[in-house]
Image: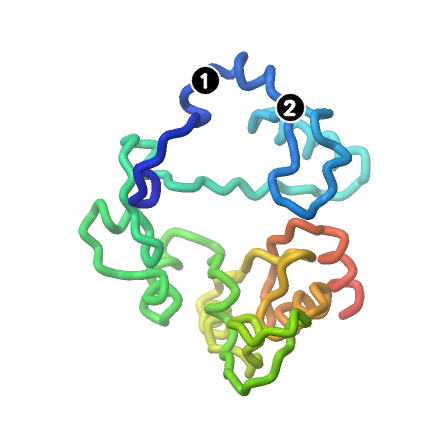
Amino acid sequence: MVDGVETEDWFASDFTLAEIKTLRAIQARSGRSTAYDGQFQIPTLDEVIALAKEQSAKTGRMIGIYPEVKHSTFHGSMSLVAPHHKPYDFVVKGDSRSFGDLVKPAGLDFIKTYADAVGPWKPYLVKTVNDGVERSGDSTLALNDRRIDGSTGVIENAHARGLLVHTWTFRNDASGYGFKDPQAEMEYYMKLGVDGVFTDFPATGVAALNALR
């Protein structure tokens, strides 16, 4: 059961590391370049850490890594029936709080007891309005055409508690609310005060940051 859906497939846990090392990485998202398909192995966490250290020494600047553990409870128990509106860890413990609750002041107070930063999905950070204007450039009126009307207060409330805010995910091939330009979208969130962004296109993120300096 994966996110409450019965799924028949192969998973990483079905293989040994030696077997996984016989595979080669490919681009999984349609519409993106496949120029590097088949050229690289799937790295281990140790190999990623070693690469970051090597490039830190080579460039003279600290390059960090930001590991994301998806479905930690599933990997601990090999059982996952999780709703999308709350962490599965909460489901197991009978905790009724949702992701929305965690970005409220009381939720941020809770996060502050164990973390230095919070990583809310970007729609939690902005207020939006449906004003009937098509903005995404695809000639249809949809959710992403909503006008952004500033901050919801999550960023400010997190900062007041000493928490950094890192939001996700920004992509050149998938626009967010009211934006046709992915760099402009990242610039907007940076102006709101986020401390970091997750993006599949780091060059665009660097360009957005440099544009604001």
* Residue type of the residue flagged with mark 1: Phe
The image quadrant that residue 22 belongs to is top right
Q: From what the image shows, is residue 99 above or below residue 132?
A: above
Please name the residue that numbered disc 2 is placed on: 24
Q: 89 or 42, which is in the foreground? A: 42
> Considering the numbered disc 1 on the image, is that residue within a helix, a strand or a loop?
loop
Secondary structure beneath dot 2 equals: loop
Q: Residue furthest top?
A: 18
Q: Position of residue 213 (x, y in %)?
A: 79, 68
Q: How many marks?
A: 2
For mark 1, does the 10 Å Cα neighbourhood hold few (<14), some (14 to 19), or many (20 or more) residues?
A: few
Q: Is residue 145 left or right of residue 127?
A: right
x then y, percent, for residue 204: 74, 57
Residue type pointed to by label 2: Arg
Q: Earlier in the sequence, mark 1 or mark 2?
A: 1
Toward the viewer: 205 or 31? 31
Which percent across, then down, holds residue 95? 21, 55
Q: Which residue is mark 1?
A: 15
Q: Nearer the viewer, residue 113 or 27?
A: 27
Whether residue 145 is situated above or below residue 63 in the rendered picture: below
Residue for point 27% across, 43% down:
81
**Other residues around mark 2 within 10 Å, as few (<14) / some (14–19) / many (≥20):** some
